Image: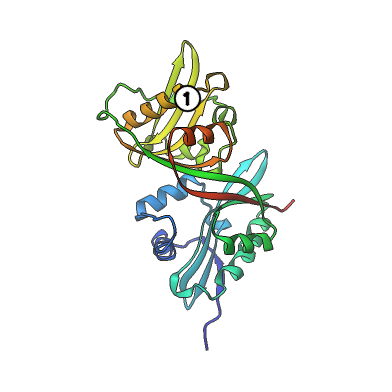
Amino acid sequence: MAAMPEFISLVGVRLTDIHAAFVDAFSEYEVPMDMPLERLQSMLTTRDYRPELSTACMIDGQMVGFVLVGGRIMGGALVAYDCATGVMRAFQQQKIGSQLLPVALARVQQAGAQRFVLEVLANNQAAQALYRKHGFVVTRTLHCYQTTVAVSPRTDAVPHRPEILAEIDEAAYNSFVPTWQNQLAAYQHMPEAYHVVGLLRGEMLAAYGVIHRDSGSILQMGVHPSQRTAAVFAELTQHLAVAVGTTALRIVNIEADSWLDQQFVASGWQNFVSQYEMEKRFA
């Protein structure tokens, strides 16, 4: 007789156990994922992972599925975010996900969350149907881009300007509200991992960017509404590449049809995947 699944919170669960399940679950994911233990730890840190809000499916003492959940206070209320949901390959097609999701939703609701936010690949219709069944609605379409640029070796010519982020209006500069994993809250957890670029026009901050020093992944690119030109976008792109000495740039979760989205298209960046942001409201 097959063992019945047990659903538990991830409080006290070792990161190494989460990592083993994560790597297996995403080993055949549409977007290839290189996720050593240290990178998973960084990802969970920047996304405000909360083990008490998270749920694992256990069978015979083994974690076979998980919903890793982040939590932030936004507008005075707790908001939950799906950092990652997965089921190990040997247990897929056994409706583990359809059993796991309602338990995970009940857990975050009981914790007082007013909203639960996630992203899902645009072509993953099965996951979208499951989320809709449990009350999620699509809030926007997101595009992910990558490009290669000609760049000189890394120099000190592009100063690190973390002070410019102190009072930045993220939505105004980005031309949309950044998604959970791209918010400056992520930067604030690991500021040492990022280089902050600022383009000044006199005393005015014309544009800024935040890029990961090792991966070349861009957290944010923001341009002041009065400075939105193709030339400023191109200058900011080049400064980001030079700052960390890379020729390969990547950015995720750009809101479709925003000014930034239009610039990536016009500049020839490759849209390597698209996603939907979905949300469920409890209140």
Say above or below: 33 vs 258.
Answer: below
Image point (34%, 31%), residue name: 241
Name, please, the residue furthest toward the bottom.
1
Residue 242 percent coordinates (x, y): 32, 29
* Side of 151 where 163 appears, left or right: right
Compared to 227, does 31 lie above or below? Answer: below
Packing grade of label 1 (10 A; few <14, some 14-19, many >=20) is some
Count the marks.
Answer: 1
Residue 68 percent coordinates (x, y) = 52, 57
Task: Tell me the residue at 51%/35% (across/down).
Answer: 184
Q: Which residue is mark 1?
A: 230
Find the residue positioned furthest to the right.
Answer: 283
Q: Secondary structure at mark 1?
A: helix
Please provide percent x and percent y for residue 79: 63, 47
Q: Residue at x 58, y 50 (%)?
A: 276
* Amino acid at dot 1: Ala
Quarter location, residue 250: top left
